[in-house]
Image: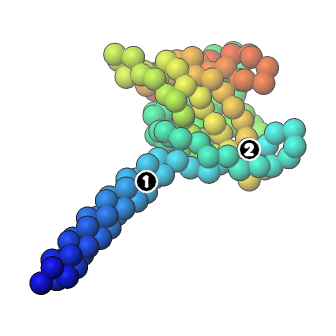
Amino acid sequence: MAHKIKMETNIKLSSFILLILVIFSCKNATEKASEKIVPVIDSGGLIHKTVKNLNKSSISNGLWISTIDSLSTVEINGNHWIFKYVNIKTELDDQYEYLISEGVSDKQNALIEGRLILTNKSDTLKYGIYHISHANMTLVYLPRGNFHHYKKKK
C-alpha cells in the first residue's frame, strides 16, 4: 500500500514538472515570434543578425517626396520600400523591405525614436528615426549622419 502511494506521488510530481516545462517552452516560442533574422552587411561581409521588437507597418503607405530634391521619392506599400527618381527606371537594387526596431511613439502616434532597417538581397541600410508621422518623415542616415526629409503626397 505504501508503495502504491509513493508511485502515485511520483506520477503527480512528474506530471507537475512536465506541465511546468510545457508552459516555459510555450512562453519561449512566443518571445521568439517577435524576433526576425535579417541580413546585415558589415566590414566582414554578409552576416545574419537577430533583431527584436520589430514593427513592420508603422509608416503610412503611399508616395513620399523628398523636401530637398522633389524628383526623389520613396514608395511605401506594406513593408516594401522602393526608392524612385523621376525619369529613371527603378532597379531591383532600389527595392527593400523595411523593419522598425526600438520604435517610440509620442501622444499623436508619430514615431520619434527608433531604427529603420532597409534590407534587400545584397544590401542593408540603417537609419535613425527622428520623426515619422502620417504626413512627414525625417530620418538620419547612420553611416554619414545626414538627414532625409520627406512629405507624403496627398
The residue furthest left is 1
The earlier-in-sequence mark between 1 and 2 is 1
Q: Amino acid at mark 2?
A: Val
Dot 1: within a 10 Å radius of its alpha carbon, few (fewer than 14), some, or many (20 or more) residues? few
Quadrant housing residue 128: top right
Q: Residue at x 20, y 72 (%)?
A: 9
* Numbered circle sitting on residue 40: 2
Front-lying residue, 123 or 70? 123
Q: Residue at x 31, y 59 (%)?
A: 20
Dot 2: within a 10 Å radius of its alpha carbon, few (fewer than 14), some, or many (20 or more) residues? many
Q: Residue at x 79, y 43 (%)?
A: 41
Q: Amino acid at mark 1?
A: Asn
Q: Is residue 24 left or right of residue 61?
A: left
Q: Residue 66: x percent and y percent? A: 64, 22
The residue furthest front is 2
Q: Is residue 133 left or right of residue 26?
A: right
* Numbered circle sitting on residue 28: 1
Q: Residue 154: x percent and y percent? A: 46, 26
Residue 95 makes an appearance in the image: no
Front-lying residue, 24 or 154? 24
Front-lying residue, 98 or 149? 98
